[in-house]
Image: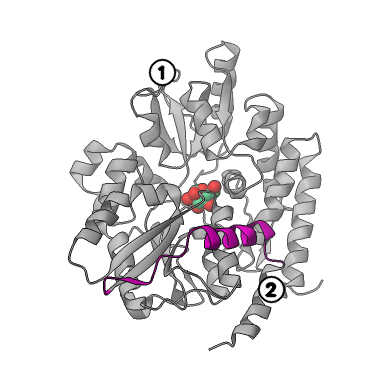
């Protein structure tokens, strides 16, 4: 067991200054809503923190669980939707040395960082070595680190390309075609914008850049050297392509300030031919009153000519926080939350992509949910973000540099050179890279 002060010192080294907004949020959250008690009426309470949309989506299932005969109950706290905001909230309370939660619904990009910080309990002693065995292979990625299982995924998302079936006879086969189709529709006045995506300085932009890098045969991270590889010619092509979407008018300049919902709003109002988003967008685009309802299809993200495309793996999954007073009950709650029954319900009610293989081959689900077959196909080539405890820092560098490009006339090579240099500096300062 690592003494708390040593652990806190190590954490400060790893994380730098505690994000002050997150710290304030954590203090405010603690002050304004007292943490749920860890037991009620003699029944242990498993306290869970998750982004508000997941809390809403699972509310009915949780109500039924609590009304049932399980010897424990579940209390869910709603956190912010943004992955960084939720992580700031969670990590700030963990850095303060206490957390009022047993379980945390974590983005796949947090695993290495939280595991390395000692904030999580390994799950294999509680759930068995085969806990992921029935899941599609890609949903199993990003849950382990350093030989342990830290997380069980609730959803199996990969980013997809949404396109308008009333404007186009078929989806684009590659990125050149995407731009050609978009320009043609814009020229003929059929649609205002060609392609909308997420260019704000936040984690969503890192996912978009990762997809562009892969689409041109490049990479963000070399796991062999533990270094980013943004100086490659492929990286330059990829980032030039993204930048040109905005500079050439296929994407609005406002993309530089778009997160998922902003891009979705524009596309759902009928203003764009293409949209890059996660599977949840399907249900929203097909709900009553949506102007493009029935006029949208979805396809895996294409690559540049001659290259295979792919979407970022964006799963959310449950982790057990170290110090939980009832780890066994909490682990059973993880098993229930991530099990096929809850995932089936979430697919039908919200369009969340499942992780269980059995759900992807269920004929009834495939008929009711056309997205499932595309999602299964997209899961074959998932793009995994760098699995390093320093991920948040190098992602921040990439977002900053690429977002800067979208709002300036700087040459992409300069921004990429800076991103590579700053990433190296961070890795070196933290001892993850030898000095040159
Ligand atoms: C989605 C993905 C998550 C990603 C985030 C970026 O929530 O599931 O993995 O980090 O979008 O905005």
Element marked by disc 1 = loop
Q: Nearer the viewer, mark 2 or mark 1?
A: 2
Residue 15 magenta-drawn? Answer: no
Q: Which residues are magenta?
A: 17-42
Distance from Cα at disc 2 to Cα at disc 1: 54 Å
Instruction: Using residue 248 as the reference point, say whether residue 189 is left or right of it.
Output: left
Residue 41 magenta-drawn? Answer: yes
Viewer-proximal residue among 324 and 344 = 324
Q: Does residue 375 sit above or below 36 in this rendering?
A: above
Q: Residue at x 48, y 22 (%)?
A: 269
Viewer-proximal residue among 95 and 125 = 95
The residue labelled by disc 2 is 12
- Could you say where residue 329 lies in the image, as x and y percent from the top left? 31, 74
In which image quadrant can residue 17 be found? bottom right
**Crowd tier of the residue under label 1, counting other residues whose Cα lies within 10 Å: few below 14, some 14–19, many 20 or above:** few
- Could you say where residue 315 lies in the image, as x and y percent from the top left? 44, 54
Residue found at the far top of this picture: 188
Q: Does residue 263 sit above or below 120 in this rendering?
A: above
In which image quadrant can residue 194 be found? top right
Viewer-proximal residue among 21 and 221 = 21
The residue labelled by disc 1 is 166
Element marked by disc 2 = helix
Instruction: Using residue 172 as the reference point, say whether residue 255 is left or right of it.
Output: right
- Could you say where residue 411 lies in the image, as x and y percent from the top left? 80, 39
Q: Residue at x 76, y 41 (%)?
A: 412
CB within 8 Å, label 2 to label 1: no
Give the position of the C terminus as an image quadrant: bottom right
- Whether residue 209 is visible here, answered yes or no, is yes
Instruction: Using residue 93 as the reference point, say whether residue 364 is left or right of it.
Output: left
């Amino acid at each position: 067991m690592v003494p708390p002060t040593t652990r806190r010192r190590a954490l400060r080294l790893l994380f730098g200054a505690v994000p002050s907004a997150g710290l304030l949020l954590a203090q405010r959250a603690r002050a304004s809503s007292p943490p749920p008690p860890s037991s009620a009426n003699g029944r242990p309470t498993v306290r869970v923190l998750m982004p508000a949309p997941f809390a809403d989506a699972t509310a009915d299932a949780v109500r039924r669980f609590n009304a049932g005969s399980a010897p424990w109950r579940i209390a869910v706290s709603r956190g912010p939707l943004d992955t960084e905001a939720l992580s700031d909230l969670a990590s700030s309370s963990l850095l303060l040395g206490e957390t009022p939660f047993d379980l945390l619904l974590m983005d796949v990009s947090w695993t290495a960082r939280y595991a390395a910080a000692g904030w999580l309990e390994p799950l294999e002693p509680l759930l068995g070595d085969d806990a992921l065995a029935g899941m599609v292979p890609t949903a199993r990625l990003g849950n382990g680190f350093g030989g342990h299982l830290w997380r069980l995924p609730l959803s199996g998302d990969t980013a997809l390309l949404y396109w308008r079936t009333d404007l186009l006879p078929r989806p684009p086969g590659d990125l050149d075609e995407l731009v050609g189709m978009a320009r043609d529709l814009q020229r003929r006045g059929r649609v205002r914008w060609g392609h909308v995506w997420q260019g704000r300085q936040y984690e969503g932009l890192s996912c978009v850049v990762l997809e562009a890098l892969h689409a041109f045969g490049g990479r963000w991270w070399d796991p062999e050297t533990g270094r980013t590889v943004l100086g490659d010619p492929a990286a330059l092509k990829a980032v030039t392509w993204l930048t040109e979407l905005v500079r050439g008018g296929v994407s609005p300049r406002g993309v530089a300030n778009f997160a998922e919902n902003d891009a979705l709003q524009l596309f759902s109002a009928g203003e764009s031919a293409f949209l890059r988003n996660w599977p949840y967008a399907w249900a929203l685009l097909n709900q009553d009153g949506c102007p493009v309802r029935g006029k949208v299809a979805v396809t895996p993200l294409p690559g540049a000519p001659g290259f295979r495309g792919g979407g970022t793996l964006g799963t959310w999954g449950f982790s057990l926080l170290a110090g939980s007073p009832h780890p066994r009950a909490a682990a059973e709650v993880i098993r229930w939350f991530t099990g096929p029954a809850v995932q089936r319900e979430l697919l039908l009610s919200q369009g969340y992509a499942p992780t269980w293989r059995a759900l992807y081959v269920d004929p009834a689900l495939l008929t009711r949910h056309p997205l499932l077959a595309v999602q299964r196909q997209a899961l074959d080539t998932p793009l995994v973000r760098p699995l390093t405890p320093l991920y948040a820092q190098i992602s921040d560098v990439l977002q900053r540099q690429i977002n800067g490009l979208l709002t300036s006339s700087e040459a992409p090579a300069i921004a990429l050179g800076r991103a590579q240099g700053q990433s190296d500096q961070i890795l070196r300062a933290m001892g993850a890279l030898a000095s040159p």
